[in-house]
Image: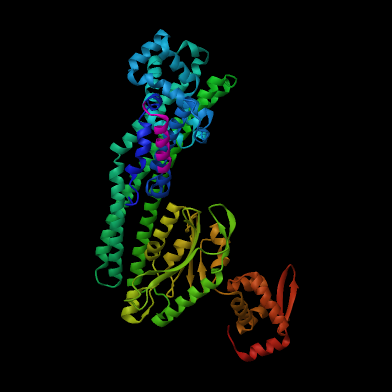
Amino acid sequence: MDPVCDLDSVVKPAEIVVREDLESLRRMFSEEERIELWNRVRSAYKRYIMECSIEVSEEIDKLIRGKFRLAQLLLATTFKLNQENHEEITGLFKDEEYGILMDFEEFKIFDRLSVDDIVEFIRRREGKVYELVMKYYRQQYNILEKKWGPLMGDLLYGFNVKYRARRRKIEEAVVEYIRRYGLLETVSEIEEAVKKVVEAGDLRRRIEEEVREKLLREMGVERLRERLRVLEEERDRLYKLLERVEEKAVGYEEARDRSRRLEEEYSRLVSKLTRLEEELMNAYKLLSEKEQELARLKTVYEKNAGAREALEAEIEALRKTMEELEREAENYKRAAETLEEEKRILLERLEEVRDSLEGRSEGHLVSIDEARAIGESFFARIRYRIGDGIELYDPRSGRRVRVKEWSNIYRVYYGDPEKDPIVSQALVFTREKGVLFRKKDILVYAIQLVHSNRFSENGFDNKPVSLAELVDTIKPIHEEAVEQGYYALLVVSSPTGFTGKTIEFVIGGAGKGFVSKNLTLYLLDPVTNKIYYNHGDPAAVENYEVVKIILPREEINRVVEYMLSREALLEAMKYSPAEPMLHAKWVAGKLGIGLDIVRNAFQELEEKGYGKVVAAGKEIGFKYSGEAIEEIMASGVEG
């Protein structure tokens, strides 16, 4: 906890008020004392929001806010009941909020009664206790979250903390009465509906308590989570071992044996995670069947408001529990999928190491000076393209958004630039949102990956970036983006290129390939100017133009250079011997360049007298002039 925030001290004024009941606050504290309490609570609440709220979990934050709001409501109610003129305080709350607070204070009689005492009062159908039980169910306080949640906001959490035990005792007494004596006569007209609601509530509570306990005890969820953490460390150690294998510092057999053990552990944990998911989904199925049963019954009692509201409330409670079970099952499913993916990466990494040992995996041979120059050119071009803002497709919303300016632009070094002659590094562009508390919203990472040790030792490198290296680079970025809810667009460049497995991981095929709502990934080979991405990912397709570091003028020059080569002319002669011509679409496909760029290049060639842009059926083509043909054939340029 931040030393600035002393949570116990900050919450203390609200605790003092909430521990008292309404009557004791009115009886024990004078008007002046209650005004002083109000000011202390209000001041502490502001301090909590500014100094402490961001330091606690979301759930704890809701509980504390609820406690403050309940303390304020209790004090405001004392002013209202005593008819003390403090409109600036009493006007902060609604009549419904005052009403429910006074009702719950009236129910305090139940605090000193046992469940059996309450059952006996209900059986005799007499007295204050019986009347209050009837009022509790007539007012639908057994479904507080549905009836009052939207109205009270944070107050809901405060009420649940203060009155949870009281509510539970009343509801347990009514359920116990129904078990012993049958349904209350006052609700006999909706007997089946009430019976089904009680059954559904019992099932829901059993699912929430027994099934979760089973998962924790019998299936050892805590031990499983700890094993997953250990597995991550074992994987990292294995990858370091594989790097030593590539350097021929240790034998391949040792790494292969260790990887097999890790692969077996992956399989065991995937099996357990799958069983956990199935257990939760079986519980989900039971609740779903009960929810459908109540929904059918609701149509029968559509005209009976009491029955309908009771059924609707239990249906909503069932749905909330089902949503929680579904979310938890999805977490286990994702964990299993992650392990399966890590197992696949592990096997492919082994293949990469074997290929490297057998001399089948080599990238571009690049000197350290070339690598530095390529990196600086890459960063300069990225800054040129997006430094003043961009428009891009945001997969979180499915819409295009405009980033007018960046909140921050900075470098990240993956190593020590003071010690190593060259290190992997990134240029990061961030857009933040928020007025009081700024948070990341959109980030662009431009990363150049290099093998610092190989450059240091040899002055050059020809080892392509492996799949493990790529995954280790993108994983923390992706995890943070998911956790904090921002969108990251990531361009990874390597002067030595990428292994086939690395490219395959990104571009995929047959339903594979990297895709995420929080991160779009591109690989850039700056030597060949090729960009690899998943063509099945809408965001990767939509944002392709953003990451192209080749400027339009350079692309036009590339088309012009190709069109004036002997290779292009010979291709044009194959297509049309009498009048050599090439289609714009064919050239675009050949060079991997946009059709609009090719069309501009054709226009430029025509203006310089090398031929004419013509219509060829439904397509656009470029027909060479006689002078151009002679010049190209004489120059001998192959293309």
Residue 276 visible in the shown view:
yes
Question: Looking at the image, how many numbered discs can be counted on the residues?
Answer: 0
Residue 491 visible in the shown view:
no
229 over 458 or under it: above or below: above
Q: Nearer the viewer, residue 149 or 250?
A: 149
The spot of residue 222 in percent (x, y) is 29, 43
Report the residue at 54% width, 61% height from top.
540
91 over 46 or under it: above or below: above
Q: Residue furthest bottom?
A: 634
Residue 272, located in which quarter of the rendered image?
A: top left
362 over 133 or under it: above or below: below
Q: With 487 as the anchor, is 361 left or right in this view?
A: left
Q: With 333 as the anchor, is 400 left or right in this view?
A: right
Report the residue at 42% width, 52% height from top.
483
The spot of residue 501 in percent (x, y) is 42, 65
The spot of residue 329 in percent (x, y) is 41, 41
The spot of residue 32 in percent (x, y) is 41, 33
Q: Is residue 34 magenta?
A: yes
How was this image coloured? Answer: rainbow
335 over 304 or under it: above or below: below
Report the magenta residues as a range.
28-43
Residue 541, located in which quarter of the rendered image?
A: bottom right
Q: Nearer the viewer, residue 510 or 400?
A: 400
Q: Nearer the viewer, residue 540 or 401?
A: 401
Q: Is residue 26 magenta?
A: no
Q: Nearer the viewer, residue 517 or 464?
A: 517
Viewport quadrant of the C terminus: bottom right
Main structural element of the magenta stretch: helix, strand or loop? helix
